[in-house]
Image (cartoon, helix red, strand yellow):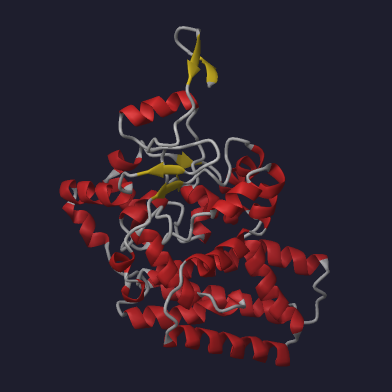
Amino acid sequence: MTTILHKESNQKIHVENPSTTDNIKHLNDFYWTNFKEPHAIRRKQILKKYPQVSKLMGPEPLTKYIVFCVVSLQFSIAYYLRNTSFFSWKFFLLAYIVGATANTNCFLAIHELSHNLGFKSPLHNKLFSIFTNFPIGVPYSASFKPYHQLHHKFLGDDKYDTDLPTRFEAIFLSNIMGKIFFATFQIFFYALRPMCITSITFTYIHLLNLISQLVVDFLMLKYWGVNSLLYFIFSSFLAGSLQPLAGHFIAEHYILQPPSFYDFEHFEKNDLMPPETYSYYGILNIFAWNVGLHNEHHDFPYIAWSKLFELNKIANEFYEPLPKVKSWALVLFDFILDDKVTLWNRVRRQRVNTEKAKLADLEY
């Protein structure tokens, strides 16, 4: 039982905590629902009203040129730091300011390529993702694509959406120290969690990604030294740690405006869910392939980064009412300091039929 103050009558009201049998559960649990994810529904509505949106779909030729420049920048700095101590301020500041920004760009370029938005050929997207992976320092691109496909196809699914924190994570990390730890090391959670939850088929692309990355790393160690490789790896760590751009990981799907117990009655009566995707329209999108327009991206994953703002402009009445964040940096602070925002703040759906998923055949 929870006591709240009704704003209009200024009277105290006693509200029963949500039952564990309800569609939506709070307390020490995720936000469970039987409702479909909203993006497929909104996609149909937008295409019905604005069929011209379909013309925005397709690869963006500019992507490969930007990626080449960013990868070249990272190799140039790695060479420059080859004789600089890992423990120096110059090394740390270059890795934090330039390296983390550039590797975030590489991570999210691989995200674009996973939707086949760099080239028309899926194979060319996969191969260029391996090239984009080089500054990250560890093989990542081949595994990211199938797991990310599952995230889109089964958003919030209890098994196949590996973007969701596990129950173990939520139990032990939903406190201020746990959230500091999670926000600092979230790159490891996103890298390791998928392998612990859902298996994918190992293909020749995975092998090529692994071998080519090891060759690049070996050549760097042999000719430039360990500090150059450490610059790549440390930049990747910082890209998913306490750095402004890393706020996008939490901003995208965590419920940042959790409903009060009183609000639950409104949600249940109107068959609504707390919003599960947030968009960000600020300046940091310049470095992040407009991934901040996350409602738009999930609605139309075949529309490239360069046309997401145009999609928003065409169908603005669909996107204006949706939740948004003003700052990725503030999202990190709020996540850590707001006791109402925890790892439980995610919408989950019941596990889909395994046969229906056909993991080996998923190709987005």
Q: Whole-percent x and y of residue 184?
A: 68, 56
Q: For residue 80, which quarter of the picture?
A: bottom right
Q: Whole-percent x and y of residue 285?
A: 49, 55
Picture layout, residue 16 above or below residue 223? above
Picture layout, residue 184 above or below residue 139? above
Residue at image coords 43%, 26%: 263
Q: Can I make out residue 157 in this image?
A: yes
User: Number of marks in the image?
Assistant: 0
Judged from this view, the residue extending furthest toward the front is 21
Picture layout, residue 238 above or below residue 222? above
Q: In the image, is 194 to the left or to the right of 294?
A: right
Name the foreground residue: 219 vs 201. Answer: 201
Q: Whole-percent x and y of residue 6?
A: 48, 13
Name the foreground residue: 165 vs 320. Answer: 165
Residue at image coords 42%, 71%: 145
Q: Can I make out residue 99 in this image?
A: no
Residue at image coords 27%, 52%: 40
Name the foreground residue: 259 vs 303. Answer: 259
Name the foreground residue: 264 vs 152. Answer: 264
Residue at image coords 50%, 84%: 209
Q: Whole-percent x and y of residue 17?
A: 49, 27
Q: In the image, is 212 to the left or to the right of 294?
A: right
Q: For residue 125, which quarter of the picture?
A: bottom left
Q: For residue 34, which quarter of the picture?
A: top left
Viewport quadrant of the C terminus: bottom left
